[in-house]
């Protein structure tokens, strides 16, 4: 097991009605003025927008608003938010929505403390050393942005999608009420379930030279719980316990817990960022559902023991005398699971065809400037193989 630092400074308020405590929570932190950041209007339809406004007004907390965050959040809106935050001298960004809203808020938070574009953080030319605090009210179980140290933004001039990690990206606090996820569409629920799984799958299938048995057991247990809860919510969208499982797993899957003690690079995530960066209609979870089985089929021989445990303990494959067949059955069953909850399983279903694969692979490798080294090395040639396997 490698040395690690486990830092989870985000205070979580979990359960029914926790959003009704927003005003008091902000007052406890001494917040005077916030930038209220949200998406394209769903929180107005479900009443959460009015709840937040009423909480801010009742607590005499000043605020300015910036809505309009899209899936695959855009740099242009981030830059607008940075200008507002500086001009209005806000002392907290309140992100209400899903992972895209949180990522946008995080980029605004670091951008408000510098005199250059926060895109320089995204492409690794600068590292943030200061930030405005970010708080969140989550409305979908998916990205884990409420407790993660990551931030992913799409540059809508170049259509590059880039992420960076920093402790400056940690939320000050997060409000998680599973009831707020009841109205999420079946498709987006499935996208979220897939994303949660992938945050742990990519940690579990990493660093084969390091033993971390406790972390492995946590990872496999979380995956099994998510698979089971995902099935339930597709049939019963208002099942509180299943929604609660997904929402809490959303946080734990991406706050580093399920990868402690080993290194990981999350190769499939990197390949998917290029996919949904180039094709803005592609949801992140949908892209992951297509790419992970392709990556797994090309990679399993590098770590057969891990794949066997996953096949038996998460996918419920019956053990036979043919280990390779059992592994392939586990991968196939994962693909079947994604399909059963409404996810695509080929790039063609997403409207992405072979004439784009070389550009996707080139972009994913930063035009020859990087190689992703994990249980298998993903260079341009391997990336191209994965895209072709997923076609």
Image (spheres, rainbow, N blue to C red):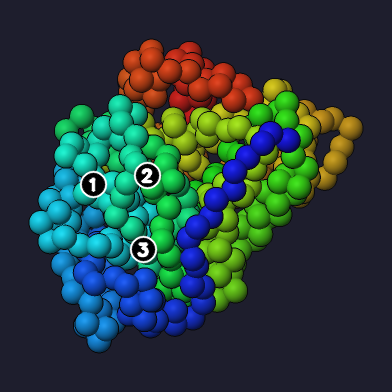
Instruction: Report which quarter residue 305 is drawn in.
Output: top right
Give the residue number, with chain letter if any, for mark 1.
113
Instruction: Using residue 166 as the reference point, say whether residue 131 is left or right of it.
Output: left
Furthest residue in direction bottom, as rendered: 58
Q: Which quadrant would the C terminus be assigned to in this image? A: top left
Mark 3 or 2, which is nearer the eye?
3
Q: Is residue 368 visible?
A: yes
Viewer can see residue 220: no
Choose between 142 and 88: the one closer to the eye: 88
> Circle 3 sits on which residue?
135
Figure quadrant of residue 309: top right
Q: Is residue 106 above or below residue 158?
A: below
- Specify few, some or many for label 2: CA neighbours under 10 Å numbering under 14, 14-19, or 20 or more: many
Above or below 329: residue 123:
above
Kindly identify which numbered label has been placed on residue 151.
2
Q: Nearer the viewer, mark 1 or mark 3?
A: 1
Residue lying at 12% horizontally and 51% vertically, measured from the top left? 83
Q: Is residue 366 above or below residue 247?
A: above
How many other residues sit within 10 Å of disc 3, few (<14), some (14-19) or many (≥20)? Answer: many
The location of residue 356, given as percent across then percent down, is 33, 23
Disc 2 on helix, strand or loop? strand
Image quadrant for the N terminus? top right
Choose the circle earlier in sequence order: 3 or 2.
3
Nearer-N-terminus badge (1/2): 1
Name the residue rendered at 67%, 48% in the picture. 219
- Viewer-proximal residue among 24 and 336: 24
Q: CA distance from mark 3 to mark 2?
A: 14 Å
Q: Who's the residue at 10% across and 56% down the image?
A: 87
1 or 2: mark nearer the eye: 1
Identify the element where label 3 is drawn. strand
């Amino acid at each position: 097991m490698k040395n690690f630092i486990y830092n989870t400074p985000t205070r979580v308020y979990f359960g029914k009605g926790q959003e009704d405590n927003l005003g008091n929570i902000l007052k406890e932190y001494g917040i005077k003025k916030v930038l209220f950041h949200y998406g394209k209007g769903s929180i107005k339809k479900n009443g959460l927008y009015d709840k937040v406004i009423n909480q801010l007004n009742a607590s005499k907390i000043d605020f300015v608003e910036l809505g309009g965050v899209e899936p695959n959040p855009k740099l242009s809106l981030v830059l607008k938010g940075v200008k507002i935050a500086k001009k209005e001298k806000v002392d907290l960004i309140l992100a209400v929505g899903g992972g895209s809203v949180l990522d946008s808020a995080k980029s605004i938070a670091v951008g408000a403390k510098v005199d250059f574009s926060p895109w320089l953080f995204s492409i690794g030319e600068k590292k943030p050393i200061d930030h405005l605090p970010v708080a969140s009210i989550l409305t979908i179980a998916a990205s884990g942005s409420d407790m993660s140290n990551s931030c992913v933004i799409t540059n809508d001039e170049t259509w590059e999608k880039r992420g960076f990690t920093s402790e400056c990206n940690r939320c000050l606090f997060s409000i998680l009420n599973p009831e707020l996820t009841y109205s999420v569409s079946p498709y987006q629920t499935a996208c979220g379930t897939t994303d949660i799984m992938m945050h742990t799958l990519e940690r579990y299938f990493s660093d084969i030279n390091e033993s971390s048995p406790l972390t492995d057991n946590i990872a496999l247990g979380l995956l099994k719980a998510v698979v089971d809860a995902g099935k339930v919510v597709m049939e019963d969208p208002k099942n509180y316990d299943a929604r609660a499982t997904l929402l809490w797993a959303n946080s734990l899957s991406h706050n580093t817990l399920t990868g402690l003690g080993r290194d990981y690079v999350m190769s499939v995530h990197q390949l998917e960022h290029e996919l949904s960066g180039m094709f803005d209609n592609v949801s992140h979870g949908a892209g992951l559902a297509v790419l992970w089985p392709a990556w797994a089929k090309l990679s399993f021989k590098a770590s057969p023991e891990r794949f066997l445990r996953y096949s038996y303990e998460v996918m419920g494959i019956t053990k036979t005398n043919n280990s390779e067949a059992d592994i392939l059955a586990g991968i196939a069953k994962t693909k079947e699971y994604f399909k059963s909850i409404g996810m695509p399983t080929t790039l063609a279903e997403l409207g992405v065809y072979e004439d784009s694969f070389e550009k996707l692979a080139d972009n994913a490798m930063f035009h020859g400037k990087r190689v992703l080294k994990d249980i298998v090395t993903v260079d341009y040639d391997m990336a191209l193989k994965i895209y072709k396997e997923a076609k």
